Amino acid sequence: MKLASGRVGRLPAYAVQRIATIKRRLLAEGRDVIDLGAGDADLAPPEIAVRTLAEAVKDPKMSRYAFQTGLPEFREAVARYMDRRFDVQIDPNTELLPLLGSKDGLSHLPLALLDPGDLCLVPEPGYAPYLGGAILAGAEIETYRLRAEHGFLVDLDELHPNLLDRLQLVFLNYPNNPTTGVATRDYLVRTVQLCARHGIVLAYDNPYCELVFEGYHAPSIFEIPGAREVAIEFLSMSKSFSMTGWRIGWALGRPELIAALQHVKTYTDTGPFLAVQRAAAAVLDQADRILPRVCETFRRRRDAAVEALRAVGLEVPRPRATMYLWVPLPAGLDSFGFAERLLEEQGVVVLPGASFGPGGEGYFRVALTVSEARFAEATQRIGRALAPAQAG
């Protein structure tokens, strides 16, 4: 009896599973655990989301199949948001697809675009669904090591011409998870132009575009000339609007790319819950009012966390975007070993850099998902865990 396909066998284990197991055991033992692992903020969802959802679930029509067309008012609210936020105009009927969170679309995109043996470029460290989706599509995978000295940017010009000629799909994510790197407009212009020259589809994962500080503007890829021909962009209500569990996001792109992804999804799901789409539409129409408070909360947390970590001897950069810090470890420390020891001995969850791929070794990621006071306590525990290595 065959119990798993070869493609499933090629999927790496979700490397943080052991950390999650340890956390459950410690909580069962009554230990105080501070979780800085998952990018799942402790902030409440917008009040208008809750109110709108509560009303929508009373409407029997909201409990019907959404299918891929979804709720017209959600599509139209996304179009208005993209126009206000990025000065990007989209056709809500042909250039947009509602998603069960952006992870849904990112992981299904390779199935829509790639045949077995087609080449896909995946950044490393990076978000696991890029790699997982490509594996499940039977694609050939080229990983690209993100490096601090290059701003954690994927420089496609570095690739051998033979690879560029074969490359069908590349994943980019700026502001970046886990490194917090950001992309300049000049970089995006060069990248879009290269993709156009070589016939490469650019999958632009942009869920952190609203979590920006000090006036930084995280662009939509469609602000870049020529991007409409080559790119598909993924955005989400999860991070910026504290709606992770609601599972609502969207993809944007030229009609042919959207149609291919939609066709795959007709065989995997029947779309996000209509009531959630209505709630998301209400939130998007008030995004300009909601987001400044969210960003200010994360800015305060970022500043407090950076200073606290520096105080225990960690040279952590101050990011311009995202809800994370990408923290360099002292030389010689293994990121998985450190993360497990920190959890076992001090009750603090962080994500080892290598859990995002081998290119993340030498770092750990913390999420700014707890209060400043709670993070200060976590930092003291991190300092205690680091003391033996720093003393050596």
Image (tube, rainbow, N blue to C red):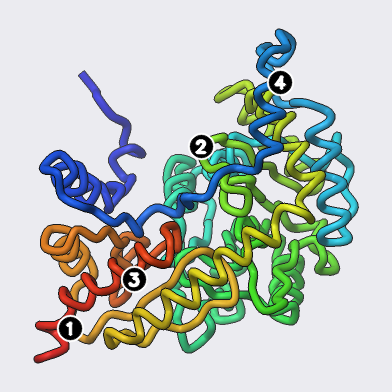
Q: Quick check: 166 above or below 144? A: above
Q: Quick check: 124 above or below 7? A: below
Which residue: 70% across, 69% down? 218
- Amino acid of disc 3: Ala
- In the picture, measured across the screen, residue 57 lies left or right of residue 243, that is right
Indicate the quadrant containing the N terminus: top left, top right, bottom left or bottom right.
top left
Whether tag 2 and tag 1 are in contact, CB under 8 A, the answer is no
Res 160 seen here? no
Residue wearing tag 2: 245
Whether tag 2 and tag 4 are in contact, CB under 8 A, the answer is no
Which residue: 21% across, 48% down? 23
Callout 4: 10 Å neighbours few (<14), some, many (20+)? few
Residue wearing tag 4: 55
Instruction: Name the mark nearer the viewer: 1 or 4.
Output: 4
- Amino acid of disc 1: Gly
Residue wearing tag 1: 332
Separation of residues labelled 2 and 1 (CA atoms): 37 Å
| Secondary element at image label 2 | helix
Disc assigned to residue 376: 3
